[in-house]
Image: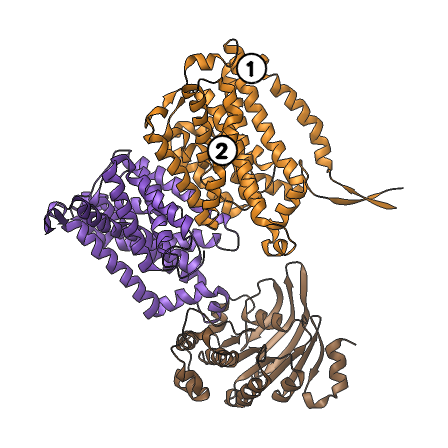
Chain colours: A purple, B brown, C orange
Amino acid sequence: MIWINIIVQGILVGGLYALFAAGLSLIFGVMRLVNIAHGDLIVAAAYLGWFICRVAGLHPLMSLFIVVPLAMLVGYALQRFILNRTLGKDILPPLLVTFGLSVIIQNGLLELFTVDSRKLNAGALETGSFPLLPGVDIGYLPLLQFFVAIAVIAGLQYLFFKTSLGRAFRATSDDPETAQLMGLDNRKVYAWAMALCLGVVAIAGVFLGIRANFDPAIGPSRLIFGFEAVIIGGLGNLWGTLIGGVILGVSQAIGAQINPAWQVLAGHIVFLLVLAVRPTGLFPRMTG
Amino acid sequence: MSDILLGVENLESWYGDAKALHGLSFNLKRGEVLALIGANGAGKSTLLKCICGLLPKKSGAINFKGENISALVTSDIVAKGVALVPEGRRLFPSLSVEENLILGGNVKRKGPWSINAIYDLFPILNEKRNQPATSLSGGQQQMVAIGRGLMSNPDLILLDELSLGLAPIVIKDIYSLLPKITGNGLTAILVEQDVTRALHSANQFLCLQEGHISLEGKPKAFTKDQISAAYFGM
Amino acid sequence: MSAFVSRSTKASRVAMPLALILAAVLVAAPFWGETSTLRLLGEMMIYLALASLWNLLAGYTGLVSIGQQAYVGIGMFTVVVCTVLMGLHPLIAFPLAGLSAVIIAFPVGKLVFRLQGAYFAIGTWVMSEVFRLMTSTIGALGGGSGISIPTPMIKAIAVDKFWREATIYWLALALGVGALALVYGLLRSRIGLALTAIRDSEIASSSLGVSIKKIKFGVYVVVAGMTAMIGSLVALQKIRVSPDAAFSVNDWTAIVIFIVVIGGIGTIEGPIVGTIVYFLLREFLADLGSIYLMILGAVAISIMLLAPKGIWGYVAQRWNISLFPTGYVVKERSE
């Protein structure tokens, strides 16, 4: 029964990893950009949530109503004024600029909030649970987090395939030059994509903050978890990313059960196995 | 002169350091169908791309409806009423036939063309409306590309190599529909490898040779030999 | 009038004797410099070496790795294994580090080469994390907190402190110059010509039968080996080796990237300029702590957006200079 509980908890945490990954997947799909600062932005969102909760006395979930729009604004500006200038045939500029951003964000957070770890307090939500099976308790928070992940991915899928903005994303991703002939301004399309990405990042960040302690240095590992979920699930497939996140969560949970020090390592090893055996991932829809 | 829709003055353009167009100047009146002929590399597609703002390295004036559009970005030029049906069709593989057409109408302008009008013109597209655009045959894809161009109700439509990679009978079908497209007074520039077909469909022509205009005027005013000479630069 | 092919430039002919004088001064440093100066110069050489190698990978081979710290760490832990576990003379660890890294680079490379572009970059980072986490769990290597190289082993390097510092310094100097020489030699060779062709157009060069994959893999493995040798030297200098420090992204990759980007990516002279600029900035700004690092990041971003060729790239293009020419120029012999 312990193992069933481990696996269930792993599945639920996989939802959070899928949230980390969804933004990465979206941006890579639309503009072939990988944002090295992605994880740091998630942490920054967590800090923004913490700050707003402190100042306005809000419940963390309520803070989402402020954090998400703010983050979207930042995303739009970031893409429009900085990242758009890095796009092109050369892979170096986006990589190096986002790497520089990662350094700036980490150190900026360090300056503003010190190295002490923080947490968002969601009250009763964090401790409440119900028994699914004897020995298997489902916490309200992990369950909510999992459903939010599904809702976000479903929302993104709907947006991509059923709205005019999604049509613009797909067309610009297919052929940026011809997309301009449709009256689409690539600069704005990319900026909207990044705004959307940071909206998802904001949700991920707040849930990260509620779930566990966070400090300025944990950004890169969030990026890596998101990245691993994307690769395991398969490029260009958001539902695949959810499955990837779940596989990662379960691997880490099993690893932690064997030896707590092996938690993260277990996830890496499963990732490497998938890379070795099925490099395109489990359900790929596009090539890297 | 308000009936001049497009006025090009001394247009020069470069690919890197290589000059592609050398001081081109010509006028296009409303309602005219201009055939743009010339050998490969003569500069035909380059000229169309310049008009659409897809080539940044250029000098000279491009006047559309009295306004100089040479410094505008492509999306703004398209909004003003220019549409390009690109060489090789360039349909969006991730979009269905209908989505490609709808996207063509992204720029909202008044005019006779709507999605139903396109389906009237090309009934086969209605049957295949939800299929991925690139799963259609070459000729059908060309219809989608033309329909997509018409959806923005342009004042000027640029058709780049409609016959590229298509079987003769398909080309014949498409060209037979051309009068329906230009019949409403739509001004068009037609780039074509097939010189005879191009000159047959147009009432004006321009022959490019290595980035220069080597001959221009009404097709009927010249003999085959004269046009050949201009085409090959003899 | 007849033509001949030249491989040197005016600037390089002037620079060569100057470089030799500079080299002599540097070699003699233990005799004219204090310990602190020696350590600073040694550190500069180490970063120059790391930067030249990273530049070879990213600027010339198109492999942007943010995981080279994996090999620095492997080099450092090779020293630990040699001295603590096997009781060997520490200087043997030096070539052994290179060898271990080359061996490890084969399976690692095979894995990460399955990824492209930015995903390759993150993949290299993941590999480094794997090594960090693995070494943290091995008690014999000191576990999470690390282990120190035994004093007798350090003393075995040389007769007394002066010669120890000198030896470590000379090794660092050799690595710095060696890395430059390796990069320069490689780029002047046929492999270098292939790399430049690959950089200009992968499609065109692959159609000429250039085996891109093999060349890229080969460069990756060689760079891994040399990076580990640099790591082993760092271990001898720092004495204490811990997984977090050995496999630190900030210490071994972020700074290196900064140096290469500011100096000029894709040029041989770039890392030299970048190293000097970095150490100058560190001298004046390090007191600012995190703000200093933010400034470094902002400078790197600005350079990438405004002057992507870096300081040397700009200079070289503006005044058409090349100190380490690798090309072929057809000149006319005046009769």
Q: Nearer the viewer, residue B115 or A222?
A: A222
Name the residue carrying label 2. Answer: C101
Residue B79, compared with residue A141, is above or below; it is below
Q: Residue lying furthest top in this view?
A: C160
In which image quadrant can residue A238 be found?
bottom left
Residue C140, compared with residue A257, is above or below; it is above
The local secondary structure at tag 1 comes to: loop
Residue C33, compared with residue A6, is above or below; it is above
Chain letter of disc 1? C
Direction from residue C184 to residue C78 in the image, left or right: left
Q: Residue at x 57, y 63 (%)?
A: B56
The local secondary structure at tag 2 comes to: helix
Q: Nearer the viewer, residue A192 or B160?
A: B160
Q: Position of residue B181 (x, y in %)?
A: 51, 87
Q: Nearer the viewer, residue C222 or A24?
A: C222
Residue C277 visible within the image: no
User: Are labels 2 and 1 on one chain?
Assistant: yes
Q: Position of residue A108 (x, y in %)?
A: 34, 39
The label shown at residue C33 is: 1
Q: Nearer the viewer, residue B30 or C302?
A: C302
Direction from residue B172 to residue C302 in the image, left or right: left
In which image quadrant can residue C295 be found?
top left
Direction from residue C2 to residue B21 in the image, left or right: left
Chain letter of disc 2? C
The label shown at residue B4 is: none
In which image quadrant can residue B21 be found?
bottom right
Mark-to-mark CA distance, 2 and 1:
33 Å
Q: Residue at x 44, y 85 (%)?
A: B124
